[in-house]
Image (cartoon, rainbow, N blue to C red):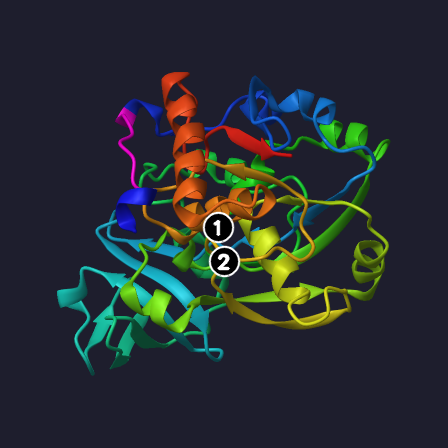
Amino acid sequence: MNELYNFSLPDALIAQSPAHPRDHARLLVYRLNDEKIIDDYFYNINKYLVHQTTIVLNNSKVQTCRWLFDNAQTELFVLEKLDTHTLRAMVRPGKKFKINDRLLLTDWLAVEVVAIDHEGIRTLRLNVPHNDARLKNFEHIPLPPYIQQDDRLASEYQTVYAKPPGSLAAPTAGLHFTADLLKELRQSHAFAELTLHVGLGTFAKLRADNFTSNRLHEEQFLLDKKNAAILQTASHITAVGTTTLRCLESLAQNTATFAAQTGSTDIFIRPGYRFKVVDSLITNFHLPGTSLLLLVAAFLGDKKTMSEVDAAKELQKLYAHAIKHQYRFYSFGDAMLIV
C-alpha cells in the first residue's frame, strides 16, 4: 500500500515561497475523458473548467497559533483553547514542559503544565487570558515544517477570501486565486463557500488504525443556508482543494443533498470510495504517504472506474510528469486541475 503512494522528490522542487502574482503558478490540467495532460498557468484555468460549474471555496483563515519565545528556542503550537486561560498545545522542547511544572516564558507570562496526553500534547494553564494583547508579539502564522519560518510570508499563507479564523494550516489550493481572477471567473460560474478548519492531520502520515477504522483526524465544518441553497441547485461542482472536497462529500454522505449545518468530519476518502457530489478537483501536489494522496487517487479511480492499483499508477504518472517538468510542490507550489 505505502509504496503505491511514495515518490522521490528533489528538494529543489519544494516551494519555499509562492508565485508572484499568485495566479502565475503553473497548472497541470488532467482531462479525464481522454487522459490528456496539459501544461499551463493558473491564470488560464477558466479555459479548462466545465461550463457553468459551481466553484466551491473553503474560506477558513489560518490562526496565529505558533507562539515563539526565547528567539524561537521555545515554542507552543496552540491546537485548542479550552477556556480563557487553558489551552492544548504541542511544545518544544518537550523536556522543558513536565507535568505540574510552572514555567516563566516572559517576565509576565507563566504557564503550568496541567496534563500530558499519550501523544505528548500538553494542557497548559496561563496566568493571563490567552487574548492578552501582549501575546500578539509572540504569535505567528504556522508555516509548514518544510518551509522556513518567515513572518514576511504570513499574508501569502492566507487565501484572498479567508474569513473565519480556525485553521492550523492553509487550504492551499485556494492560494492561487487573486481578486482579479475571482472576478473573471464569477462572470462564467457560480461560487459557493463553506468553512472547514484544517487540522495538523492534513500533514500526517497514514497509520494502520486509519485503515482498520476507516477514519482520519476530525475537522470542524460549517455550511450556511445561503451557500447550501447554491450547492443544492448546482449541476456540476468543482472543489477547490482536498479540504473542500472532504467537506462536500461529508455533507452529502446520507442523501447527496445539501442543508445548512455545523459539524465535524473524520471521513477517510481512499480508492474504492464513490464520490457523491464533486465532479472536478483543483489541488496542489501533496506529501508522499499522506491521506491527501489517497484522496486524489480515489478521485481518479472513481471517475475512471479503475482499481486501486491502477488509480495509484495513474496518480504516479501525473506526479512523474510534474517532477520531470519541474513543477513546484507542496503548500506554496503549483496546482493541478482534474476535470
Q: Which mark is residue 330?
A: none
Find residue 318 and report its image quarter. Answer: top left
- Magenta stretch in the rendered image: 6-11
Let me know if residue 19 appears in the view.
Answer: yes
Left or right placement of residue 107 versus residue 274 in this view: left
Let me know if residue 141 appears in the view.
Answer: no
Element class at badge 2: loop
Q: What amino acid is labelled 2 in the image? A: Ile
Residue 211 included in the magenta stretch of the image = no
Q: Distance from label 1 to label 2 (Cα)?
A: 5 Å
Q: Position of residue 243 (x, y in %)?
A: 55, 53
The quadrant of the rendering that contains the C terminus is top right
Q: Position of residue 309 (x, y in %)?
A: 38, 45
Q: Which mark is residue 269?
A: 2
The front one of 53 and 158 is 53
Left or right placement of residue 115 versus residue 137 in this view: left
The front one of 249 and 123 is 249
Relative to 301, residue 8 above or below: above
List the residue tagged with mark 1.
295
Find residue 184 and report its image quarter. Answer: top right
Magenta part, dominant SS? loop
Find residue 69 and report its image quarter. Answer: bottom left
What residue appears at the point 34 percent right and 40 percent down from the top-left corner? 149
Left or right placement of residue 248 versus residue 218 in this view: right
Task: Check contact, mark 1 vs mark 2: CB within 8 A.
Answer: yes
Q: Residue furthest left?
A: 95
Element class at badge 1: helix
Q: Position of residue 308 (x, y in %)?
A: 42, 49
Q: Mark 1 or mark 2, which has the lower sequence index?
A: 2
